[in-house]
Amino acid sequence: MDFQVVVLAGGASKNLIPLVSKEVPKPLLPVANRPVLSYVLELLEQSNLKDLIVVVEGQDAAVRVGGWISGAYVGRLRVEVAAVPEDVGTAGALRAIAHRLTAKDIMVVSGDLVSDVPPGAVAAAHRRHDAVVTAMLCSAPVSGPSESGSSGGKDKTKKPGRYNIIGLDPTKQFLLYIATGAELEKDIRMQKSILRAVGQMEIRADLMDAHLYAFKRSVLQEVLDQKDTFQSLRQDVLPYLVRSQLKSEVLLNGAPQAEENGNEKVNPLKNQVMLSQILANVSTPSFHELYGLGTNGSTRRTHKCCVYIASNSKYCMRLNSIQAFSDVNRDVIGEASHLSGYSFSAQNNIIHPSAGLGSKTTVGPHCMLGEGSQMGDKCSVKRSVIGRHCRIGSNVKVANSVIMNHVTIADGCSIQGSVICSNVQLQERVVLKDCQVGAGFVVTAGSECKGEALAKKEK
Amino acid sequence: MRPSVSTTQEFLKEGEEGVAMGVQRKGANRVSEDPEELTRVPLQAILLADSFATKFRPITLERPKVLLPVVNVPMINYTLAWLESAGVEEVIVFCCAHSKQVIDYLESSEWFSHPNFSVTTIVSHNSISAGDALRVIYERNVINGDFVLISGDAVSNMSLTQVLKEHKERKKKDSNAVMTMVIRPSKPSPITRQSRLGTDELFLAIDPNTKQLLYYEEKAEYSKGVICLDKLLLTDNPSISLHNDAQDCYIDICSPEVLSLFTDNFDYQHLRRHFVKALLVDDIMDYKIFTHEIHSSYAARIDNFRSYDTISKDIIQRRTYPFVPDVKFFGNSATKLERQGMYRASEVVQSRYAEIGPFTVIGNGTKIESNTKISNSVVGEGCTIGSNVSIEGSYIWDNVIIEDDCKIMHAIVCDGVVMKSGAVLEPGVVLSFKVVIGQQFVVPSYSKVSLHPQPTKQDSDEELEYADDSSGVAKILSITSTLEGSKEAMTSQLLEKQSWPTYELGTGGVGYVWSVCEGSHEEEWRHSIAPIPADKLAEAMQTTDDDLELLTHDGSVLPTAGELKPDYIDSDDDVNEDSRDESFESEVEEAFLRFVCENIKEENAISEQRTFRVTCTKSCADAAGVIFYSMMKLSLETPHSSPSELFNNAVNVITQWQKLLKSFLTDIDAEIEVILKFEEMCLESTTEFSPLFSQILWLLYDKEIIQEDAILKWDDEKKDADDFDKVFVKKSEEFIKWLREAPEEDDEEVGED
């Protein structure tokens, strides 16, 4: 397939402090003990999309990511790692690597996607319709992205459009409208002309833009060149293409289609050719083609924005917040366990053969215990991931938490709903609830914390 | 799922058996104890025999719209015959303009004497809109249950069983589901949508699961190229379908609440523009409208000349079966269907050399001479058509005389018209009753000719059609009343006057050519029966293109500040806004006193005041201030002898109406407004309250009507004011001090959390 894939892997994402650090940039955050980026890469590999450019923010991070990739995927994927400055936005990142894009179509995917929706299906939909852009949509999780406790009765006003508000044509193949719920002021403003052309539009609030797009390269590059104020693919480029789909300003297939604005008189012969093409097509023409034919022999320039809607049973999450980090880890060893790539034991958990458990220590289902980790007596682990080479004392309770590598936990600690980064030391009887502990931090004996982020001061 | 399956099935059965059951039931009602049976009332329909519009002028100056013939049958017969066949048992015909003609016609027809199908009339000459009509009907108290609301220009053959069943089931689950609107998909191409019924473009938003109507917009100009949907709509509905491919059939199933809503909201005039819009926009009342989509059956409304043409053709093409020319229903004489959709009455005298083309109806007693060609047209009874005449796509009513060599294309020719030899009607011409066109005269496109002069000072058809424009109303009334009263005299007088200028209609021509005014000329082609000229179509497409241009030009859809105005403040109100501003206070006050006198429940009062506010486009703060003012005035007017008694009065009034007041105090500004208003009162009008200021302020605080923040903010605002202005701040100094000190601790606690 003539597809090039750009993986926007990000860097030191601010949302994920204190989980990310210089040593562990966002693409390398562990999900079930392997970097989150590996999920995307393997997903692409399954769809035989092996020509990749991984874009990382920051030179240091790029070196680390590149080192990991060359170790893990040598011979399997053709991966280039490119570093871009921080805060250039997704559109800026693509501009920076534009010279490396050569294929007819480009797939852009966010490096924090954990999903089992085949990208090949998106690519196929894109090609089938000869679309300018195809976006993958998946059903929005039932719970909101930021569940920060109960904020009282006013919750209802915030609820709508937590994710995206998306307008689709009746066949659910074309994207007619897209907006991010939270960014809308009050009204959803819909162009009448597009509604006139399509007749009926379905507006959905239960779909989420999965940040996996297929673009026609020529169009993408043209838009990035001409609209130099565009910062983000999601907020600028995609809405622009959707908005202008019946009054296209981009050149399809690199060749100008008609003369300049106004007098778009195309000879009727060409029109007939187009009509016969449409008639010859087995499928009914899309509204774009009908609209494009127009009246009185004039044609309009249109382009198509398509969607691929993943079925409800598929898993699709983005690791873009601390909450999402916990959720994704829980899901990958829980309900979406097929994503982890591990084989589960009869107890529905994964305990590395080299890991050691003390007496009366129980590890429940949907848990993971990494290579070389040792646990003392009378410990209990529920729905948690524990990394490699951790030293855990006796009488330690771990529930709904993620513990990364080389963590030392002394006796009598209790950890609930927390994330403990690598090389952290918890002294005796530490009680953590809903906390994040940054790498290398030492929690002194007897501390009790609730809902806090603990990290070393940056030097 | 539903507990009452048996009853709905029973209802189905009842619907099918229709009228015969209705008679039995009257007896059974008294003894039956089944609640369903007890509430069961005969199915009623309200038929509005006045369109409250002027789209069929000049014809409607002489004859009511519902009596205009459609394929040689007066329009109202289609509506009545359909209602009868659909199982409606009682029809209330509301007559306004030309009421005498309507009643005379109904009397002469068999509708009044029909067994099991009662037709009664209500006459009101003061009604200028559908809203007024429904208010009159409410006062008469003749509606006992769900009813079908329809205007006398609807042509349909749909079955009501399904939509009634849905409506009743919904109503049972949710008492706020007051109306079900029938819609029908229309063709999905923009070009045909423009032309088919000649109506305005319609945008609907419907919940695909519940079929609830969420948005309705028929006048496209208001918000230009975009539709604004409140994003809160997506709170309750994960998906919404937005339709541009639906057609409103103007057939509504309503619950009795609809009538009382019209009565409560005296400013509702237009069914769609006011009532539906208010119900959708104003969520306080929480009433809901649902839609019912029909696919196979026919329903449409004759709204303008274009839909007259379209629906006539649909009837000829039998899409409205059984209401077609060769099936005998009320008011038509038998015609015979011949090949190619040609209908001919039994006594047509036709020359052997006359050529009658497809999809044509020829009425009884009409004579057609040789070499005449008629196609796609309807010719009424008793017409005389000469030789070498060509008639295409036209509607010739009764007793028309067309002499030799005339040419008629896409025109409407009313009763008694005489066309002298060689006259030509170009597309879109309308000749009203008894007009005479002179020899060889060519009537230009879109002309309207009548014996009546065009009403002077008529701005445009559009404006008159909005019945709430008061000047327009007066005109309609004066016209109709003169017509009712002295029609005979006037006509004869007109005929005596033989001074018709020949340049208007040729030698021997009789009639006035109505001038088409500037504004509506542009729109004429939309409503006319003439086919839409190609250049107009192209123009229409161009405008849609321009819309797009606007939006994509700078890559942004952000509106200019002016456009952000909520679109329900629609231009209907703009004209009257200024006068309403002044009267707002007194009206709110009046309304409040009425609540008190009539003991109206608080909730009703809230919704009434609220809709009033919405229609006056006032802010909540203004309304709150006025309401508080009326409350204080009320307590002052209640007899009292000492300040303490006055205080007690105030306590009573505030306690009783606190909910009403509270419902307008949506934000802190409104609360401050109330304090400021109170201050103003104490200084100016009702100085009796000034000694009680701080006491009442404390009372408002205690009742949680006014929050502490508002009081403190008020205090802050007054800090820099003159001493004169600070009188009341001083009076309540102690209270404010207490407020400032006491809750400080609370604040800190909150901070810690």
Image: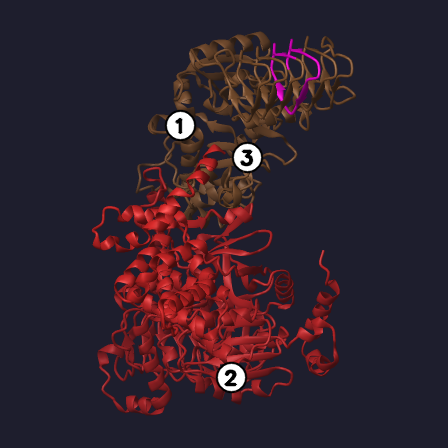
Chain colours: A brown, B red
Residue A298 visible in this rendered orientation of the protein: no
Q: Do labels 2 and 3 share a chain?
A: no
N-terminal-most mark, 1 or 3: 3
Three-letter code, disc 2:
Thr
- Asked if B397 appears above or below A128 in the picture, the reply is below
Q: Mark 1 points at which residue?
A: A254
Residue B502 is situated, as x and y percent measured from the top left of the image, at 23, 81
Q: Do labels 1 and 2 share a chain?
A: no
Dot 2: chain letter: B
What residue is rendered at 38% in x and 26% in y? A224
- Asked if B610 appears above or below B594 in the picture, the reply is above
Residue B698 is situated, as x and y percent measured from the top left of the image, at 40, 55
Dot 3: chain letter: A
Relative horizontal placement of residue B37, taking residue B302 as reference (left or right): right
Name the dominant secondary structure of the magenta segment: loop
For the residue labelled by badge 2, is the local secondary structure a helix, a strand or a loop? strand
- CA neighbours of label 2 inside 10 A, class few (<14), some (14 to 19), many (20+): some
Given this view, does label 1 or label 2 mark the residue nearer the observer?
2
Specify the quadrant of the image occupied by residue A179.
Answer: top left
- CA neighbours of label 3 inside 10 A, class few (<14), some (14 to 19), many (20+): few
Mark 2 and mark 1 in contact (Cβ < 8 Å)? no
Along the viewing direction, whichever of B571 and B415 lies nearer the viewer: B571
Relative horizontal placement of residue B580, taking residue A44 as reference (left or right): left
Relative horizontal placement of residue B683, taking residue A274 as reference (left or right): left
Specify the quadrant of the image occupied by residue B156.
Answer: bottom right
Which part of the image, by quadrant, shows the N terminus of chain B?
bottom right
Q: Mark 2 points at which residue?
A: B121
For the residue labelled by badge 1, is the local secondary structure a helix, a strand or a loop? helix
Q: Name the residue under label 3.
A: A147
Mark 3 and mark 2 in contact (Cβ < 8 Å)? no
Q: Report the magenta residues as a range.
A: A387-410
Say whether residue B189 is magenta.
no
